[in-house]
Amino acid sequence: MPTYTITELAEEFAITPRAIRFYEDHGILNPKREGVGGRQRVYPARERTRLKLTLRGKRLGFTLAEIKDLIDMYESPKDTQPQLQRFLGLLQQHREKLEQQREDLELTLSEIAAHEEQCRQLLADAKPKNKRKAVAA
């Protein structure tokens, strides 16, 4: 079974070793320890998969607690029905949050467009006055 060092995983997923240690601190990753005093982290394939799922969850906007719950759920020997229901619930909550953010962004972009148009109109109205002053001088 393949194993990975923290450096290998960091390079593979384009993240820092510090980020990987952060996920360890939150209980998402649990590498084996080897070497003198257990200072060297060794990540089996399972931990690599957990890291991959964590990064995917972050891209989707889930919190670390939600990611950990979901990953842990799928590793448990329980029935998948409750797991799928929980996942659907999280997806629905996340969808609602993103849709609200989209509405907020669209409103903000609309307001920006209105301000831009006002500024352009003010600049257009001011141009002839500046030209007349320049000619009069």
Image: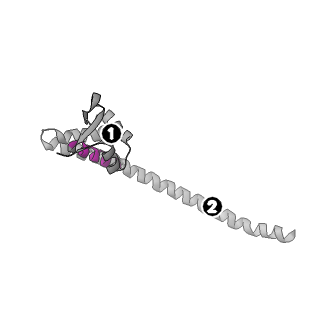
Residue with the most extreme front position: 36
The answer to whether residue 51 is magenta is yes
First to last magenta residue range:
46-59
**Cβ atoms at labels 2 and 1 below 8 Å apart:** no
Is 119 in the magenta?
no
Q: Is residue 5 visible?
A: yes
**Which image quarter is the N terminus in?**
top left
Q: Position of residue 93 (x, y in %)?
A: 31, 45
> Which residue is rendered at x = 68% and y = 62% of the image?
122
Measured from the top left, where is residue 133 in percent x and y? 82, 67
For the residues labelled 2 and 1, the Cα–Cα distance comes to 43 Å
Q: Secondary structure at mark 2?
A: helix
The residue that mark 1 highlights is 64
Q: Residue at x 28, y 47 (%)?
A: 52
Secondary structure under badge 1?
A: helix
Whether residue 28 is visible: no
Residue 43 percent across, percent down from the top left:
25, 41
Query: In the rendering, at what x and y percent does residue 49 appear?
Result: 24, 46
Q: Nearer the viewer, residue 127 or 11?
A: 11
In terms of image quadrants, where is residue 65? top left
In-image side of 3 versus 65 (left or right): left
Depth check: give the residue in front, 6 or 106.
6
What residue is shown with label 2?
118
The relative height of residue 126 versus residue 60 in the rendered view (above or below) is below
Q: In the rendered view, does 106 fall on the left or right side of 36?
A: right
Seen in the picture, residue 89 relative to 109 is either above or below; the reply is above
Q: Establish if 95 lies above or below 66.
A: below
Label 1 neighbour load within 10 Å: few <14, some 14-19, many 20+ = some
The residue lying furthest to the top in this view is 37
Q: Residue at x 64, y 64 (%)?
A: 120
